[in-house]
Image: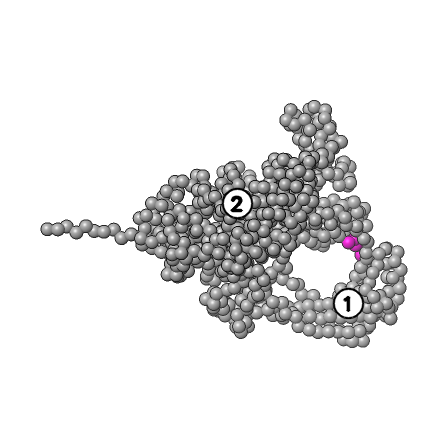
Amino acid sequence: MKKTQKKTAKKTLVVVESPAKAKTIEKYLGKNYMVRASMGHLRDLPKSQFGIDVEHDFAPKYINIRGKGDLIKALKKDAKNADKVYLASDPDREGEAIAWHLAYILGLDPSDDCRIVFNEITKPAIQAAVKEPRAINLDRVDAQQARRMLDRIVGYKLSPLLWRKVRKGLSAGRVQSVTVKLICDREKEIQAFVSEEYWTVGLKLRKEKSAMFDAELSMVDGKKLALHSAAETDALVADFQQQQLIVKEVKKRQRQRKPAAPFITSSMQQDAARKLGFTSRKTMMVAQQLYEGIDLGRKGPVGLITYMRTDSTRISELAQNEAKDYLLQEFGAEYVPAKPNIYAAGKKAQDAHEAIRPTSVAFLPQDMEKYLSKDQLKLYTLVWQRFMASQMTPAIYDTLSVAVAAGSRYICRASGSQLRFAGFTAVYAGVEKKEKDVVLPELAEKDVLTLARTLPQQHFTEPPPRYNEASLVKTLEEKEIGRPSTYAPIIETILARGYVIRQDKHFQPTELGFVVIDMLEEYFKNIVDAKFTADLENELDEIADGRVEKNHLLKEFYGPFEDTLEKADEAIGHVELPVEVSDVQCELCGRMMVVKQGRYGKFLACPGFPECRNTKPLLKDTGVKCPKCGGSIVERRTKRGRSFYGCKNYPECDYVTWDQPQKETCEKCGSFLLKHHYKNGRALLYCSNDACETRIDHPINKELEKIREKAKAKAEARAAEEKGEVPAEKTAEKKTKKTVRKTAKKSGKKTAAGGTK
């Protein structure tokens, strides 16, 4: 009797980039599939050499990345035993290049249907992708290769020049250097700025016995108010107080405020910076976790948001309908537009995939709270609210604009606004907080008003602000420098190189940054030219679309760059970084200490390093005397680089404040003023004397109470931890963070190693 041997059915191999994603996808595809992770790139240009054969059509020399040998061996074995192989790296150019490298390693034909893509990690999206495999898009691969080689040419040719002429460990890059120049140019504007005095005249007006309302003097003799001194203001106010006030014009209107588009990568980074205080790097890291999959208990791992590297505002019809159904049920028909809102994409948007949105509206933020870390929940809530708001009707406001004539010379203006219909603001207010109602009394033309109070106020014009995380990303996007996916690594690179420091959440160039940019601007003008960089980005887009040949772009760039490099090497001597000598003597060796730039700002160091390693904090005198002991109040820094102010006589005197002391004094008690900075950039002046009458009902009191309560809660938590009384939620959070770190370590970085952008 002949025995029949049972043949084991071969499985389909799916290769993704990270283990977290592999785990989620394997659950959706079932037992006939095995899902493996490539941990990002497996091949790249070598670190030890240039790796581009310029003489032979810029042929790249790719090698397997060190340390990936065992992984490559395992993937080859799985591919050999598989019936079919699908390459499911991310749906962008970098992902397309990873798929191309994988095809080479696994012996697949790129023209075969071996590539699958999906915009979200959900069961329907994954199953649909498997049914629609395609060939690898070689135009997109060429675009990624061209970018990689341009970065390699600049990084490997220009960086050694900086090493020789300035100091070791420096780098230059197509996008990195332009970004540093933007920050340096802004600093030069600030340094060159000359402040000018100007005055405004606020008014408190009243109609008969109604409540007072605010107005402002806006025009004098048919011209816009322009006051530049106290004497000029006092004279004008004295004349104004003699005039009769009559309502000249009343305009009632309705104003619509439309919702913002759903998030793209850059707008998500900006909003997360403004609202959550996240760096671009942190935003992208947390978004990656939400995209790859979160364990939702019995449901297992589920991807909560769509792909987070996108510049498209497009939303699928399915997602629009899901949002519509939810809004109709929860809010009503008046909150849903007759036709779905369509948002115009940027002129350079690739539109490869959708905007960033929740994979399902049903995953409400409040329901996800128990599964997410604090940061994950914050970002997911932001994405969910922004998407839902984008599918809603505008907010409607009743506005009132009033012009008041004061005699024949003066015009005053007052405005009021009341929310008539909340619209999208019921879910998401946007960049600003919800607008507060400003109510004016019922006014009509020719009504006579009385002047209750004049409030002249001195101001000084201010220089343009330093870039923060949000404004820098916005500027890079507007100038078309780099791509949204590159913003986070670029910012981290320029910080790591010491070209800029992050001070009070704003970027400030260092002496090193100025020296390097001045040198590049003199000899490599194109490298730091925003337009040139933007044009290169546009040409890379054209390669991806198949309209420009990769080698044509590389030849056009390389020839002039190589010539300039040779000339610069001959012309530039060794650049000495300026040394700032302080008036502080080193108590260990007697030398005068010098000012150095560290990761968290400037500090004092002994010039006798390495023989003498003495360092001190650099204390910046504010020019204000301590209210406790009469010593100087100096600016200090925390280990994280945050500024605070304390007495120079510490620890003998314990006076300390987070708010910036001002040389200006209180008009009531003569104490110095403090300036409080809010997270949104707004500043508030207040008297440092708690007992001063100006502090009664002052808005700063609530803010200071919040800070005290927060500090108290932290201290209590720290004390509990020391006693071993760690709350259960804290322990869970730590475990989550530990798991995230492990996953991140395993998955590696997506961007190919060994070059600078």
Q: Which segment did they paint magenta? A: 457-461
Q: Residues within 10 Å of mark 2 (few under 14, many from 20)?
A: few
Q: Measuring from the top left, give residue 69's x and y in whole percent.
A: 40, 40
Q: Earlier in the sequence, mark 2 or mark 1?
A: 2
Left or right of 757? Residue 317 is: left
Left or right of 225? Residue 504 is: left
Task: Please name the amino acid that badge 1 sits on.
Answer: Arg
Q: Measuring from the top left, give residue 211's x and y in whole percent.
A: 75, 67
**Front tag of 2 and 1:** 2
User: 616 or 575: nearer the eye?
Assistant: 575
Q: Which residue is mark 2?
A: 55
Instruction: Name the disc covering residue 413, or none.
Output: 1
Give the residue at x 43% y 56%. 136
Q: Measuring from the top left, give residue 538's x and y in whole percent.
A: 58, 57
User: 539 or 413: nearer the eye?
Assistant: 539
- Kind of element beneath mark 1: strand
CA–CA distance between discs 2 and 1?
71 Å
Give the residue at x 60% y 38%. 160
The image quadrant that residue 42 belongs to is: top left
Give the residue at x 43% y 39%. 67
Left or right of 650? Residue 198 is: right
